[in-house]
Image: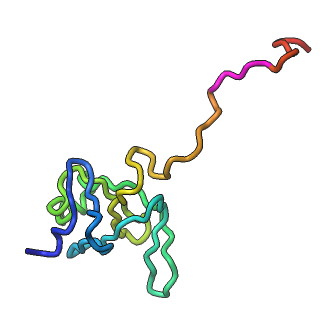
Amino acid sequence: MSGIEIFLATGDTAIMPETMQTEAPQLPKHKVKYKKPFQRACNEPDAKGKLCGGHLKRWFYMADMLEQACGDVRQTFGDQAEIYRCEHCKTLYLPNEEEPRGKNVAGLGKQSIFGLTLTAKPGEEKGKS
């Protein structure tokens, strides 16, 4: 058995089991890590020892022409896995199971008040100048 089989792959995501170590399965042509909860920037050190700091973006590897030629991510994680990639160093990140799933990569955020109809304060009327 190869070391690549240390993750759980479901229809839409690949997650780390609770009993496993924190090291992600490594692929021949890609560096793979697990995201920390609510992590949005890359924490991979570069050649000088500085952190990369690139934004982590959802990577749709099935639409990536270079990845289609390589094919190891698709072969390992399937067609629809939730994988994030650093925009600078191209390190791949698997989601953390503590993090909520969904379309918003940036996290939960705060509820917006834009678009809500606010009522007038008591004693004020609309259109009064």
The tally of labels here is 0
Q: Can you give x and y, in whole percent of width and height, for residue 68 in the image?
A: 19, 59
| Image quadrant in which you'd find residue 119 | top right
Instruction: Point out the residue furthest to the right here.
Output: 129
Q: Looking at the rendering, in which quadrant would you find the C terminus?
A: top right
Q: Nearer the viewer, residue 15 or 63?
A: 15
Q: Looking at the rendering, in which quadrant would you find the N terminus?
A: bottom left
- Rendered residue at 34%/56% (across/down): 59
Q: Can you give x and y, in whole percent of width and height, for residue 53 in the image?
A: 51, 70
| Image quadrant in which you'd find residue 9 | bottom left
Instruction: Point out the residue furthest to the bottom here.
Output: 48
| Image quadrant in which you'd find residue 69 | bottom left
Q: Is residue 79 magenta?
A: no
- Rendered residue at 50%/77% (across/down): 51
- Rendered residue at 41%/44% (across/down): 103
Q: Which residues are magenta?
A: 116-120
Q: Nearer the viewer, residue 79 or 88?
A: 79
Q: Is residue 118 magenta?
A: yes
Q: Is residue 31 visible?
A: no
Instruction: Point out the residue furthest to the front here.
Output: 19
Q: Give above or below for 83 relative to 110.
A: below
55 sits to left or right of 113:
left
Q: Main secondary structure of the magenta part?
A: loop
59 sits to left or right of 72:
right
Colour style of the rendered protein structure: rainbow
Q: Is residue 33 visible?
A: yes
Q: Can you give x and y, in whole percent of width and height, for residue 15 in the image?
A: 28, 59
- Rendered residue at 44%/86% (across/down): 47
